[in-house]
Amino acid sequence: MAVSLKVEERATRPRSIRNKLRHEGKVPAIVNGYQVESTPISIDEREFSRLLRENGANTVFAIEIGGKKVNTLLRESQLDTFTRHLTHVELVSVNLSEETEAETEINLVGEAAGVKAGGVLTQTLYTVTVSATPEKLPEGIDVDISGLEIGQALAISDLPKNTDYTIVTDAEEQIVAIQEAQELSEEEATEGAEPEVIGQATEE
């Protein structure tokens, strides 16, 4: 379900307008995409940040520009390096009935059996690209690692299928592995060795 976001159309000149907006607690933004010409807008930074915290980055934001209601996704946001305040936001309008691609976080769930046995967990993939209709884009994908033993790993291909979305990221991409602690300090001795991937047949 789309979340309402209030926006206002804005002028792009002079450049001092951007500073004025920021002093008012607003963020310069732009929206473009499906059936929408590129339009400069501004949004309230506090409200937008709150909506992101409560709903996630893959939320569908319902906005109104030129008397027209538009469904949008967050394409990009820029932060000031020092203040961490938003400096610019780009929204893309979408067709709710058509699939689109977006990044989503990987959330490791549980404590691996191999870690309990003294192994060390190494996560190598933190986000994946998924394809779905806008309202079914996941905010995160939970990956259960409780069954992982020392010497085992999980790859994209090991994740269960989901009817709401399709993972676009290469199926062979490794997400997480459990290694013996001593292996991490003996990289040269173990160079070239690969952890066993669950579901992959091993040679006898």
Image: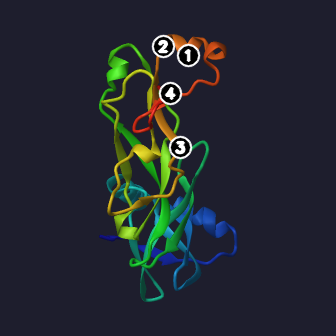
Which numbered tag is attached to residue 181? 2
Outermost residue, bottom side? 67
Q: Position of residue 147 (x, y in %)?
A: 31, 30
Residue nearest the viewer, comparing 43 with 142: 142
Side (left or right) of 73 relative to 53: right
| C-alpha separation, residue under disc 3 versus residue under disc 2 | 23 Å
- Residue position for label 3: 173
| Res 167 seen here | yes
| C-alpha separation, residue under disc 1 versus residue under disc 2 | 6 Å
Q: Nearer the viewer, mark 4 or mark 3?
A: 4
Rendered position, 20 above or below 160: below
Which numbered tag is attached to residue 92? none
Residue at 64% x, 25% y: name it. Answer: 192
Outermost residue, front side? 204
| C-alpha separation, residue under disc 1 versus residue under disc 3 | 21 Å
Residue at 38% x, 13% y: name it. Answer: 118
The numbered mark, 4 or 3, whose residue comes first in the sequence reads: 3
| C-alpha separation, residue under disc 1 versus residue under disc 4 | 13 Å
- Residue position for label 1: 184
Q: Is disc 4 placed on a helix, strand or loop?
A: loop
Residue at 39% x, 77% y: name it. Answer: 96
Disc 1 + disc 2, Cβ < 8 Å = yes
Q: Position of residue 170 (x, y in %)?
A: 54, 51
Q: Amino acid at mark 3?
A: Glu
Residue nearest the viewer, comparing 180 with 200: 200
